[in-house]
Image (spheres, grey):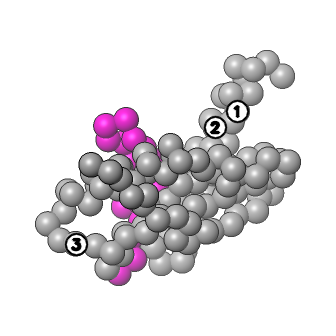
Amino acid sequence: MERRQQGKENREWGAEAEQIAADWLRVRGYIVRETNYRRKNVEIDIIAELPGEMVFFEVKARRGDKVEPLDAINEKKIKMMVRGADAYLREFDKLFKYRFDIITITGTPDNFKLDHFPDAFLPPFSRR
């Protein structure tokens, strides 16, 4: 398959996986506040709320089971999510508990497996 076509298909599957994840969260009582939140070169796939708690989600989708989706979550991605979460939370006049979760989806839009990893990581300490 041509590399350009494969990239397009991967992006389409990624967008579809994010929609699957958002729907899955809604069924479980989450209020989905944002999808594809973008600020200052950072993106958070889904921001959802439970009573008193804001949850920032990274969604990783893969077509096959040969590549583990969690392997795509690296230090750079974590730092970007933390920066995005900080920007988002600063928009409010109240404090929220918050956490960072990961949702992985493997398979195809018609036949997939979804895994949810709550509290997948803590914000790294930064030196100022």
Give the spatial CA distance, label 2 vs label 3. 35 Å
Judging by the rendered image, the residue that carries numbered circle 3 is 95
Residue 44 lies in the magenta stretch: yes
**Alpha-carbon span between mark 1 and mark 2:** 5 Å
Q: Secondary structure at mark 2?
A: helix
Give coordinates of residue 100: x percent, y percent.
47, 64
Q: Which mark is residue 12?
A: 2
Q: Callout 3: few (<14), some (14-19), or many (20+) C-alpha neighbours within 10 Å?
A: few
Amino acid type shown at disc 1: Glu
Report which quarter residue 80 is drawn in: top left
Task: Label 3, secondary structure: give it.
Answer: loop
Q: Cβ–Cβ below 8 Å for labels 1 and 2?
A: yes
Is there any visible trace of residue 8 in the rendered image?
yes
- Residue 98 is inside the magenta segment: no
Looking at the picture, tell me which residue is in the foreground, 66 or 30: 66
Residue at 75% x, 20% y: name it: 3
Residue bearing mark 1: 9
Which residues are the magenta region? 33-51
**Whole-percent x, y for residue 98 in the image:** 37, 70
